Amino acid sequence: MQHPNLFSPKKEAATEPRPLSQRALQWLQQGWRPAGTVFAVALALAFAWSVVNGRHGLSTWYGQRSQERQLKNEIQQLEEENSHLRQHVDRLKKDPDAIEHEAREKLHYARPGEVIYSLPPDPKKQAPTQAR
């Protein structure tokens, strides 16, 4: 909005130029609201950016949430594996047949008079493990 006296050539010639302090005061009185609005919008945008991308923002939160799910799954798998290993240890402590089976499988032990034949590993079963 323009002041009606700003572009009137007759009145400008008739009046003396105002001092700088009065012009600055008039500019502040007319321009504080737009400047305040621009400042408020800039502050709101900075806050919105911080909420989304900041150190503790949404993107960080989503990443940590995903990592938490992964870790919970890993913990569950490890607990299951731990449970299976405990059961296996308990069987080995209590069951002589389990001990014998383990000794025959892993250590290739044999009873007196038995002969153990070792066959080469199956290439079809070994190929996927080599790909890892």
Image (spheres, rainbow, N blue to C red):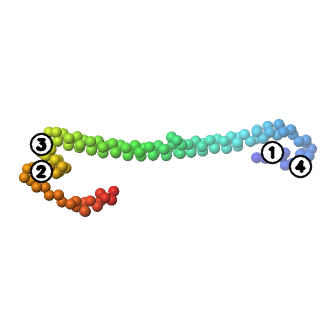
Q: Tell me the CA gap for discs 3 and 1.
A: 105 Å
- Closer to the observer: label 2 or label 1? 2
Spot occupied by residue 40 in the image (x, y as percentages of width and height):
64, 41
Which residue position is annotated with label 1?
Answer: 3
Residue depicted at x 13% and y 55%: 116
Give whichever of discs 1 and 4 has the lower sequence position.
1
Left or right: where 46 falls relative to 110: right
Quadrant containing the C terminus is bottom left
Query: How many C-alpha atoms fall within 10 Å of the one at disc 1: few (<14), some, or many (≥20)?
Result: few
Depth check, front residue: 91 or 55: 91
Badge number at residue 96: 3
Residue depicted at x 12% and y 42%: 96
Left or right: where 85 falls relative to 54: left
Q: Amino acid at mark 2?
A: Ala
Q: Amino acid at mark 4?
A: Pro
Which residue position is annotated with label 2?
Answer: 110
Image quadrant of residue 93? Answer: top left
Query: How many C-alpha atoms fall within 10 Å of the one at disc 2: few (<14), some, or many (≥20)?
Result: few
- Closer to the observer: label 3 or label 1? 3
Q: Are marks 1 and 4 in contact (CB under 8 Å)?
A: no
Which residue position is annotated with label 4?
Answer: 9
Spot occupied by residue 80 in the image (x, y as percentages of width and height):
27, 43
Q: Are marks 2 and 1 in contact (CB under 8 Å)?
A: no
SS at badge 1: loop
- Closer to the observer: label 3 or label 4? 3
Give whichever of discs 2 and 1 has the lower sequence position.
1
